[in-house]
Image: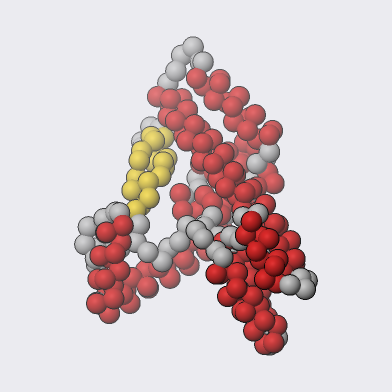
Amino acid sequence: MAGTLSLGFATSYTTAFTSVSIKRVRTSTCFRTKIRCIGWDPEGILGPPTTGHLARREFQRRLEKDADAREQFQRQVQEENERRRALRESRREPNNIEELVEYFLDTEAQELEFEIARMRPKLTNEFFTHLKFELGQLRFAVQKTEDMEDRVIELEALQKALLEGIGAYDKLQANIVKAKDNLNKIFTSKDVQATLLEMVEKNEINKSLLALLDENIVSARRSNQLQAAEYMEKVRGAVRKYYTV
């Protein structure tokens, strides 16, 4: 995984949300596929879960007004981040395609994007061929059991999620590579303004470029390269004038 930039690929946990994931829940006899809603505020501090732009605005207002609720929510966020970090470190990397399929089936919805990035080299054509072959065998089996039908639902959902996730991740990596080239073009330009105008025409002023600038500014300040940081901040200001979402 290149760098530390997420650029929207990873899910943010700084606001309340509700996400839907397909999870395997073991019953006494078999795996059952169920839809489970996963939301913040597990202790019910802020009332029942809500969705939508207006609900998020209301949630923010309540946090701003209620210091105790804000502190407890931040503590919940920190605890969840620690839980996810510990889970990541505890997971054993799969050694073959069969193990990789089960690895992703056992991955929490919030962790899927991270695991796609971590396991991207293993998500090859061979992997998806294996996935399609297993799905074909299950779909066209002469005698289908409930376990087999559940497995089809799980694998279909996994296939869709992985293909979408890989597409987003690969696009992100391409954007980062392009952003690095564009940043170098700006830094080596004798006429920054003319270079920026040229990049605007080519639609090369984007979020990836700004994020890369931010990362370089932070790195320069940590290294006590204050003059370089100040210069990059001026460049960022110029770039930001031409940035449109």
Image height check: is 116 above or below 53?
above
Say which residue appears at 51% left-offset and 60% top-offset.
244
Image height check: is 85 above or below 131?
below
Say which residue appears at 62% left-offset and 36% top-offset.
98
Residue found farthest to the top: 142
Question: In this view of the protein, which residue sits in the foreground, 10 or 35?
Answer: 10
**In the rendered image, which quarter contains the N terminus?**
bottom right
Question: In this view of the protein, which residue sits in the foreground, 87 or 11?
Answer: 11
Say which residue appears at 65% left-offset and 64% top-offset.
197
Asked whether the viewer can see residue 17, the reply is yes
Relative side of 101 to 144, left or right:
right
Image height check: is 204 above or below 152?
below
Pinpoint residue 5: horizontal percent, then vertical percent: 60, 63
Task: Locate residue 96: give its quadrant.
Answer: top right
Question: In this view of the protein, which residue sits in the foreground, 212 or 138?
Answer: 212
Say which residue appears at 70% left-offset and 57% top-offset.
177
Pinpoint residue 54: horizontal percent, then vertical percent: 27, 59
